[in-house]
Image: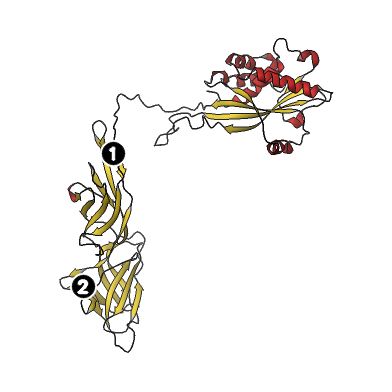
């Protein structure tokens, strides 16, 4: 691979080819004072017949850019030095104030590069050690540094091919240079492989390997329902059914709300998985996913295999009930606080969850509409642990009997319905 002076090395080899014509070439007899420069076109002295080499653009080589493996491992340590694969673009321009010399010089350059479409390794070595390239601006020490880039040792040889930009592209190249247009040809040098010299870690050799042929499984969850049936509420401790296809695997696991359930806790069939909801879930929208682990390696160990889509269900909060009574407590006003209603919920409510109390009047008189109220729970510090008991201030609520619901992150606690009376519980008299 080449070092980071490879671009300069390519320019130097191109200059060497033009400065040292092939045997039998008559350019020295026609233009004995020919100068070869490697500067921007506007810096060339037009009084001296000159061929100028101007590098103006580098692009990634599409064939080599993605050839290497990642340079870093999962811990971020450097494990290789992937090369930078570049195509270099040049302007070869002929500068002179004499009749016909522009055509002569450009024709000579075209012939030279036509006969050298590939830069031989020996030519690169000769060029970068040639005393003909040593000048005031290019001292021997600089040329030695360019030679140390090892351009001749890269395994892909460099090719010089004509490049034909569109008129708009050519205008965009010349306009910023502030130079008059002169006889010009464009070339592309491809490909230059630049590799870092930075140290990298190397893993020990692999002593053995395992190959596994596995059919691809498209695991799909269609819906999540309570075992009691579709449309029934899903609450803490409920048993739920995951319905879908290809759900059964050699090692099937269910991740529900970030909690993994596996083994005998699952009743697994291809189209359905039954399980009891684990503890630690919060009310609201809960995600669930099925994963098939693969037992691979030596010795075999569980590895991540196939995963289903992520389905969701609503885990409804529930007002706790002790015997026939719901845990609803009216707290008298005091200490500057108005009257409050305290309730106990399952599952516990996290400090960042939004909880709202909903009151709906029971048995309202026919002369008016039933009263309804909503109140937000008292805020808690962000680092507080989840709490089962919540307190809601309920000022200015007229005395009556009210149905009580609590909404946590959009999920509401259920009400008890009796036919023909309607909703009857949980209720509180204020």
Q: Which residues are magenta?
A: 212-218
Instruction: Name the spot of residue 134 as percent of width and height, x first.
Output: 69, 18
Residue hosting label 1: 303
* Marking on residue 166: none
Alpha carbon of mark 1 to alpha carbon of mark 2: how far? Answer: 47 Å
Does 289 sit above or below residue 151?
below
Does 242 sit above or below residue 169?
below
Mark 1 vs mark 2, foreground winner is 1
Does 194 sit above or below residue 303?
above
**Quarter of the image that includes the C terminus:** bottom left
For this orientation, the residue located farthest to the bottom is 367
For image coordinates 74% across by 21% down, the residue present is 107
Instruction: Name the spot of residue 7 as percent of width and height, x first.
Output: 61, 26
Disc nearer the start of the sequence (1/2) = 1
Q: Would residue 75 be seen by someone viewing this image from the given angle?
A: yes
* Marking on residue 326: 2
Instruction: Name the spot of residue 6 as percent of width and height, x first.
Output: 59, 25
Instruction: Name the spot of residue 186 as percent of width and height, x first.
Output: 68, 28
For image coordinates 74% across by 30% down, the residue present is 41
Q: For residue 168, what is the image quadrant?
A: top right
- The answer to whether 351 appears left or right of 10 in the picture is left
- The answer to whether 145 appears left or right of 296 in the picture is right
For image coordinates 61% across by 17% down, the residue present is 124
């Amino acid at each position: 691979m080449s070092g980071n002076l490879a671009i300069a090395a390519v320019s130097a080899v191109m200059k060497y080819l033009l400065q040292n014509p092939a045997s039998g070439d008559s350019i020295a007899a026609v233009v004995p004072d020919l100068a070869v420069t490697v500067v921007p076109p506007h810096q060339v002295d037009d009084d001296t017949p000159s061929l100028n080499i101007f590098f103006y653009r580098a692009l990634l080589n599409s064939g080599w850019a993605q050839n290497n493996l990642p340079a870093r491992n999962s811990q971020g340590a450097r494990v290789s030095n992937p090369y930078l694969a570049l195509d270099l673009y040049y302007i070869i321009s002929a500068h002179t104030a004499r009749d016909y010399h522009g055509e002569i010089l450009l024709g000579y350059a075209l012939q030279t590069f036509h006969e050298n479409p590939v830069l031989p390794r020996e030519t690169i070595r000769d060029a970068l050690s040639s005393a003909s390239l040593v000048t005031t601006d290019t001292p021997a020490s600089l040329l030695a540094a360019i030679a140390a880039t090892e351009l001749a040792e890269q395994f892909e040889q460099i090719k010089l091919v004509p490049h034909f930009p569109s008129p708009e592209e050519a205008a965009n190249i010349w306009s910023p240079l502030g130079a008059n247009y002169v006889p010009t040809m464009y070339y592309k040098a491809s490909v230059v492989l630049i590799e870092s010299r930075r140290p990298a870690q190397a893993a020990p050799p692999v002593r053995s390997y395992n190959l596994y042929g596995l059919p691809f499984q498209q695991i799909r969850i269609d819906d999540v329902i309570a075992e009691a049936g579709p449309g029934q509420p899903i609450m803490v401790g409920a048993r739920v059914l995951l319905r879908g296809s290809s759900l059964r695997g050699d090692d099937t696991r269910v991740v529900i709300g970030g909690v993994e359930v596996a083994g005998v806790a699952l009743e697994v069939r291809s189209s359905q998985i039954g399980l009891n909801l684990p503890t630690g879930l919060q009310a609201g929208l809960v995600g669930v996913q099925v994963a098939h682990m693969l037992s691979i390696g030596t010795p075999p160990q569980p590895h991540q295999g196939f995963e289903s889509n992520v389905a969701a269900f609503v885990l409804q909060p529930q007002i706790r009930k002790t015997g026939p009574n719901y845990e609803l407590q009216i707290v008298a006003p005091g200490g500057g606080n108005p009257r409050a209603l305290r309730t106990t919920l399952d599952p516990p409510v996290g400090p960042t969850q939004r909880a709202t109390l909903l009151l709906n009047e029971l048995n309202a008189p026919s002369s008016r509409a039933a009263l309804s109220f909503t109140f937000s729970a008292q805020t808690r510090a962000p680092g507080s642990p989840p709490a089962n008991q919540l307190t809601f201030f309920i000022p200015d609520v007229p005395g009556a009997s009210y149905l009580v619901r609590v909404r946590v992150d959009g999920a509401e606690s259920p009400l008890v319905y009796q036919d023909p009376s309607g909703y009857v519980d949980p209720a509180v008299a204020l």
